[in-house]
Amino acid sequence: MRPVTRPARTSLTVLALLAAVCALLVGGAGSAFAHAGLSGSDPADSTVLKEAPRQVTLTFTESVTFSEDSVRVLSPENRRVNPAPAQYADGKSNTARVQLSDELSQGTYTVGWRVVSADGHPISGAFVFSIGKPSETAAVVPDGSLDDSAVGRLYAFFRYLAYSGLALLVGAAAFVAVCLPGAGGVRPVRRLLASGWAVLVVSTVALLLLRGPYETGGRLTSVFDLSQLGRTVVGRPGTALVVRLVLLAAAAVLLKRCAVRLRGQDDGRDDGRDDGRDQGAGPRGLGRSVRRVGAALALGLAFTWAAAEHASAGIQVPLAVPVAVLHLVAMGVWLGGLITLVIVLRSHGAAGRTVPADAVGRFSTMAFAAVAVLVGTGVYQSWRQVGSWEALTTTSYGRTLLVKVAVVVVVLWVASFSRRWTARLRHEAAPVHQAAPVAGARTVAAPERVKATVGAPDVPAAADGGGAPDAPGGGGVGGAAGPPSPEADVDQRAHQRGLRRTVAVEAALGVVVLAMSTLLTGTQPSRAAGESAAAAMAAAQEPQAKVATVPFDMGKAGHQGAVQITLAPGRVGENTVEAVVFSADGGLATVPELRLTLTQEALGIGPIDARLKNQKGFWAVYDLQLPMPGEWTLNITVRTSEIDQVTVRGSVQIAPLPRRPAG
């Protein structure tokens, strides 16, 4: 036996490892910039308002959908004070607004929200604001993880089953259609196809029933609520699940027709036996139209994921959706095909037969093409989801992706051994195929001079009409090649056992990769996490108050006081103004009158009278409107007695309104 050359083996291994590194950057079976985040609210978190607001508005980083109970505003006594469900603010799909009841009492109010982002994942949170002053008590909203509930855990489990069923169904069907049509008549392969279809059907039905309580945070007992199921079906994720069930019904019809066709071919064989070589003759057992319909169904099934999950949200959606479809199909062809090959190798080995080397070679080519697709789609999807090298180590999504990449590197390393066994099998089978004539061609034996003794009887022809059994043209009807030698058969069996072991390890690691892909589909991608963090940081860095301290003469020699003016939040719009007067020794001073006007001299705005009111110890106003950002001049008049007053000037920098991410 001639071994595979080291340069060829090394180049294949290096190429496979490079493909692994790129392919696993794919970031999961889904793709895209996903999971919305709260970017702002009005009133803002922890603000104290002088008057009760009429409404509460939430702004998100991407479009969201919500139900009747998506936004709840609770009073300090834990009473709901928003009588109507949420609506979009000014028609913007990245907002949610609720109207509040009239005559709200003083205290701290809690806003709890739970919405569904454009990629189909529910998100939730809460914040507080106060009217008048904060109260000692406030309503408490559960803040546990959405996946910690029974519904969340079940939904994640069936989502993994759905991916597994897709891989089994697509991979086994591709193996039968492209590599070994006769495998469709092998009982374990038929069971694998049926299992993949059944798992995908059951998991899809379960996901459809669980979708309602998963989105709304309901109890597990609400899965059979028909009204909730009706709302789920008309939503994008629910519609995708219904379409998936329709495609699976069509797939069942196609599988049944293919089984009948293959069974008819088996019944039509002359000898009624299967020696393994007929199954490997090529993909002639299924018609071209059947394979085209099967490919269309596989693409359609993958589209039901891409259209409702990560790829459907974020940037470049028209490109991201087909990329995600190709990635899902390639994942199924690769992983499901590996599992099918293991089953075929085991079933043939148990029956004392060998799998045709050509079939193994065709699968090797198909798997390599699937990995190439994973490379192309993976690089693009990783760019969409991660966004930067730093995010690979600073976000949970990036760290999980790195672990997945490491596992795939190991998978492709094991796959290099599988390719070596495949090359050896094809090398061993080459002499047999070279000796075999073209199927269907007539073989004419060359004239042969035979030595004979005069008067001796003629040498009888072989009973099977062939000549010597080991002659190149004999051994079978129509000139078929003779059976391989016992030594070659032993080598082939040994090579297939080695191939079976490496492919089994590769498939087991592939299942781990699939589990990590499912985990990534439920994790907020790094790009979205970075934008949410940036929005939160920007909100934290916004000035909560602007303070200006202006000294003034109190009318006595050596006695100089100061006025401290505080504007909150110190930006364009409504501001709270508080003024405190300090005496020369630093203590609080009481003055009979304090006036404040503000002027924007650069733009010629003002003076604007703040109309401060005495609050028994300090002066304040809670609704001063400042129309423009920039430096404002403070004109402060302090009357220290019935006849003495002084006017001093100061300045304060007013910030513009913060920019919010576009929805």
Image: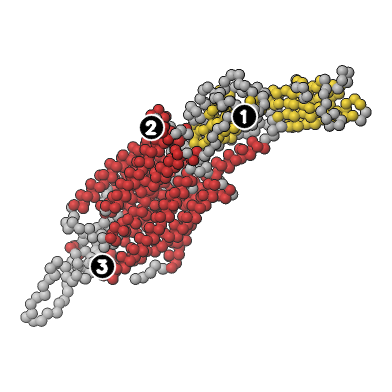
Residue closest to the eye, 121 or 619 = 619
Q: CA distance from mark 1 to mark 3?
A: 87 Å
In the image, which disc is placed on residue 232? none
Residue 73, x across and y down, in percent = 56, 27
Q: Disc 2 on helix, strand or loop?
A: helix
- Residue at which label 2 appears: 224
- Residue at which label 1 appears: 137
Q: Are marks 1 and 3 in contact (CB under 8 Å)?
A: no
Amino acid carrying label 1: it is Thr
Dot 1 or dot 3, earlier in sequence: 1
Judged from this view, the residue extending furthest toward the top is 642
Q: Are marks 1 and 2 in contact (CB under 8 Å)?
A: no
Nearer to us of marks 3 and 2 is 2
Residue depicted at x 35% and y 44%: 199
Q: Quadrant of residue 464?
A: bottom left
Judged from this view, the residue extending furthest toward the left is 455
Residue depicted at x 87% and y 18%: 642
Q: Are marks 3 and 2 in contact (CB under 8 Å)?
A: no
Q: CA distance from mark 3 to mark 2?
A: 62 Å
Amino acid carrying label 2: it is Phe
Amino acid carrying label 3: it is Pro
Residue depicted at x 24% and y 50%: 262
Residue closest to the eye, 234 or 599 = 234
Residue closest to the eye, 603 or 27 = 27
Residue 212, x across and y down, in percent = 43, 33
- Residue at which label 3 appears: 484
Nearer to us of marks 1 and 3 is 1
**Coloring scheme of the render?**
secondary structure
Q: Quadrant of residue 585?
A: top right
Dot 1 or dot 2, earlier in sequence: 1
Q: Disc 1 on helix, strand or loop?
A: loop
Determine whether 368 is above or below 639 in the image. below
